[in-house]
Amino acid sequence: MITALTQDEQTDALSTLLDWTYDPERRALFRHIAFRDFSEAFGVMTRIALEAEKVDHHPEWSNVYNRIDIWLTTHDANGVSARDIDMARKIDRIAASVR
């Protein structure tokens, strides 16, 4: 069974995820990323999607031209879990690889 992180665990994890914030309304981690153009944004989304499929943990996201908004939450845990932290780190590595 997957469980949500405690408040302290979530705070500690967020202190290491500098580009992420907590969205209390969605009970999710949130990150906004801007790229040079649509192709770059879409390429990163594709790489994230492939990684998400491998670990069977899929983000909620939206894309407008060169921008991606990403929310990570574990619905089964009704909040942020270790899976979200791991996925956020994967996303950070992917996003950093194109800059």
Image (tube, rainbow, N blue to C red):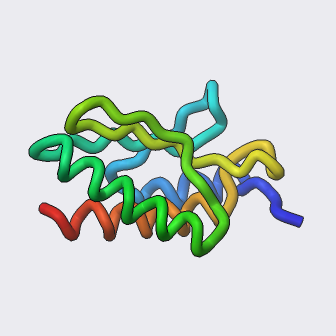
Quadrant, the N terminus:
bottom right
The residue drawn where x is 64% and y is 47% is 73
Residue occupying image coordinates x 43% and y 69%: 90
Q: Which of 75 and 8 is in front in this view?
A: 75
Residue 67 position, x and y percent, is: 26, 37
**Residue nearest the viewer, comparing 70 with 45:** 45
Residue 28 position, x and y percent, is 60, 41
Q: Which quarter of the rendered picture does the C terminus lie within?
A: bottom left
- Whole-percent x, y for residue 79 in the image: 72, 45
Residue 58 is situated, as x and y percent measured from the top left of the image, at 60, 55
Residue 44's place in the image compared with 78, above or below, is below
Is residue 16 visible in the rendered image? The answer is no
Name the residue located 49 percent from the left edge and 70 percent from the top edge. 51
Whether residue 49 is visible to the viewer of this picture, yes or no, is: yes
Above or below, 4 relative to 86: above
Side (left or right) of 67 relative to 58: left
- Judged left or right of residue 94, residue 15 is right
- Residue at the image position 17 percent from the left and 46 percent from the top: 35
Classify residue 36 as left or right of residue 1. Answer: left
Decide if residue 48 is on the left or right side of residue 36.
right
Name the one closer to the observer, 83 or 55. 55
